[in-house]
Image (cartoon, grey):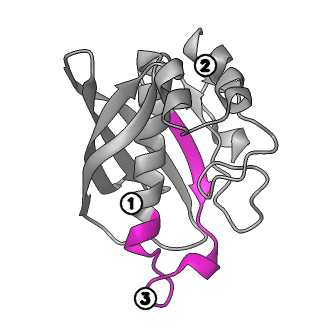
């Protein structure tokens, strides 16, 4: 998938030992999403494996929602330089998404709501560039010290996000 990456974008760093279902490279059952940016949006290219099907060869809607939440989250973290918590999100399933096909996922800021919340948008396109699924989500913006106080992340994990938060 990396050979389809557009010019003018850079890859965002991620922990190699991270086990997140969506983005963790150390999760053998996960999606192992990688993230790239052009400093306006964040992108990922992913193929959903067949063990995550819904009907026959269609990707389960919960998996599509996970992909969208993840792209919107990484977009908020990188573009706004804050850690986040998902407050709410909606997804519109427009076209079928099939397992094993390459998908382009894009996230961007839709609307900033003061210093504490942001509405993000996410989109999933099939290999022909057709919009298949789109979403909007509201995210709470957090400073790293608040994330640590809430016991969301270890100090080490927060430190690993510093290159993204300071980029």
For residue 90, above or below residue 107: below
Q: Which numbered disc flags the more N-terminal residue, 2 or 1? A: 1
Place residue 34 in its image quadrant.
top right
For residue 165, above or below residue 110: above
Q: Tell whether 147 sits left or right of 119.
A: right
Q: Which residue is mark 2?
A: 164
Q: Which residue is mark 3?
A: 55
Asked if the residue under mark 1 is in contact with the one under mark 2, i.e. CB atoms within 8 Å, the reply is no
Place residue 48 in its image quadrant.
bottom right
Image quarter hosting the C terminus = top right
CA gap, disc 2 to disc 3?
Answer: 37 Å
Query: Residue 45: within the magenta?
Result: yes
Q: Where residue 148 sits in the image (x, y, percent)?
A: 56, 29
Asked if the residue under mark 3 is in contact with the one under mark 2, i.e. CB atoms within 8 Å, the reply is no
Q: Residue at x 67, y 34 (%)?
A: 154
The magenta segment is 43-63
Q: Residue at x 66, y 62 (%)?
A: 30
Name the one closer to the observer, 44 or 140: 140
> Which of labels 2 and 3 is toward the front?
2
Q: Residue furthest bottom?
A: 56
Q: Tell whether 71 sits left or right of 9.
A: left
Check disc 2: other Cα within 10 Å, few if <14, some if 14-19, many if 20+: some
Name the one closer to the observer, 161 or 44: 161
CA gap, disc 2 to disc 1?
Answer: 24 Å
Q: Which numbered disc flags the more N-terminal residue, 2 or 3? A: 3
Q: Is residue 129 visible?
A: no
Place residue 117 in its image quadrant.
top left
Q: Where residue 61 sits in the image (x, y, percent)?
A: 38, 71
Q: Which residue is mark 1?
A: 65
Element marked by disc 3: loop
Q: Is residue 77 visible?
A: yes
Element marked by disc 1: helix
């Amino acid at each position: 998938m990396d050979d389809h990456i557009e010019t003018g974008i850079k890859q965002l760093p991620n922990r190699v030992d991270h086990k997140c279902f969506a983005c963790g490279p150390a999760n053998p059952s996960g999606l192992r999403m990688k993230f790239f940016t052009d400093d306006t949006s964040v992108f990922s290219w992913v193929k959903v494996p067949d063990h995550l099907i819904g009907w026959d060869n269609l990707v389960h809607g919960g998996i599509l929602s996970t992909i969208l939440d993840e792209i919107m989250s990484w977009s908020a973290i990188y573009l706004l330089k804050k850690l986040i918590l998902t407050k709410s999100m909606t997804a519109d399933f427009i076209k079928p998404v099939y397992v094993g096909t390459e998908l382009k996922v894009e996230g961007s800021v839709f609307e900033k709501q003061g210093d504490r919340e942001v509405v993000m948008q996410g989109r999933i396109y099939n290999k022909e560039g057709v919009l298949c699924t789109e979403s909007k989500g509201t995210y709470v913006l957090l400073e790293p010290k608040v994330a640590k106080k809430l016991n969301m992340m270890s100090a080490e994990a927060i430190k690993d996000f510093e290159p993204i938060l300071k980029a």
